[in-house]
Image (cartoon, rainbow, N blue to C red):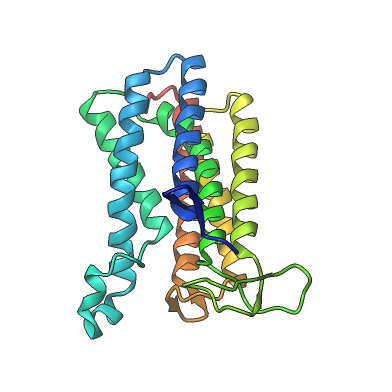
Amino acid sequence: MFNDIKIGPVTFHMYGLMIAIGFAAALMMCLKRGKKRGLNEDIIYGIFFCAIFGGMIGCRLLYYIVEIPEILKDPSILWNFKNGYVVYGGIIGGALASLIYCRVKKERFLPYFDLVMPAVSFAQGFGRLGCFFAGCCYGRETDSWFSITFTHSDFAPNGVKLLPTQLMSSAGDFLICGLLLLYAGRKPKEGQVAAGYMVLYGIGRFIIEFFRNDYRGSIGVLSTSQIISIGVVAAGVVFYLVMNFRNCKGVTP
């Protein structure tokens, strides 16, 4: 598995390249769909950059929270930025930063929240492809034909057949994006596309965790990500029902 592409004197790292492609594709998707919905293009750009900034902070903060016991043993973890990013923290941080931005700009958040979440899933699909090239977020050992063997990974065990959980996650993220776009086309009530993302992603992440074998922290028999997934799915269901009630009552969120 290759992690770098060299074109003359320039080296492209596949992980970073996939992340960049995902961000760019997500932005273009939001701009195109936002224009059809009459949403403010400047606000979309603002949300995009705030989401990146908030997401980066959220990824790191949630990692610190999850790894408090290990950090107490080895404080050097705090400034080891090669590892230590939790996707859920990025999603939460990005959403909060976008909400604050919309409040500052006096724009309603929910229309943009619904607009952005399918694109977030699309970007995540590319991000997981980046994980595949890097070898992080790897799966359990297997004898199945459905496997990948890394040879030069700094993260996954090399020379061992592993379940390609990165590709499984990527396919799931692209599928979620497609389902959300189809659902959005039916013009659901405000907030319900975003709620759909929370439910679908939470369920998918809960399931994929059973097949992963990289260290992610645990609480009992469940990984920390599975515990968070349960909360996200529950929050998504509640959010969907609340938005349904508020829209039926004619309340403007």
At x 32% / y 24%, what residue is drawn?
A: 43
Q: Is residue 212 left or right of residue 243?
A: right
Q: Is residue 205 above or below residue 126?
A: below
Q: Position of residue 243 (x, y in %)?
A: 46, 34
Foreground pick, 45 / 160 = 160
Residue 130 visible in the picture: yes
Q: Is residue 126 left or right of residue 219?
A: right
Q: Residue furthest right?
A: 145
Q: Position of residue 48 (x, y in %)?
A: 36, 34
Q: Is residue 221 above or below residue 137?
A: below
Foreground pick, 126 / 199 = 126
Quick one: quadrant of the N terminus? bottom right
Quick one: quadrant of the C terminus? top left
Q: Position of residue 128 (x, y in %)?
A: 54, 55
Foreground pick, 192 / 40 = 40
Q: Is residue 74 above or below residue 127?
A: below
Foreground pick, 48 / 107 = 48
At x 62% / y 44%, what residue is drawn?
A: 174
Q: How many marks?
A: 0
Which quadrant of the figure has residue 44?
A: top left
At x 56% / y 69%, what residue is drawn?
A: 138
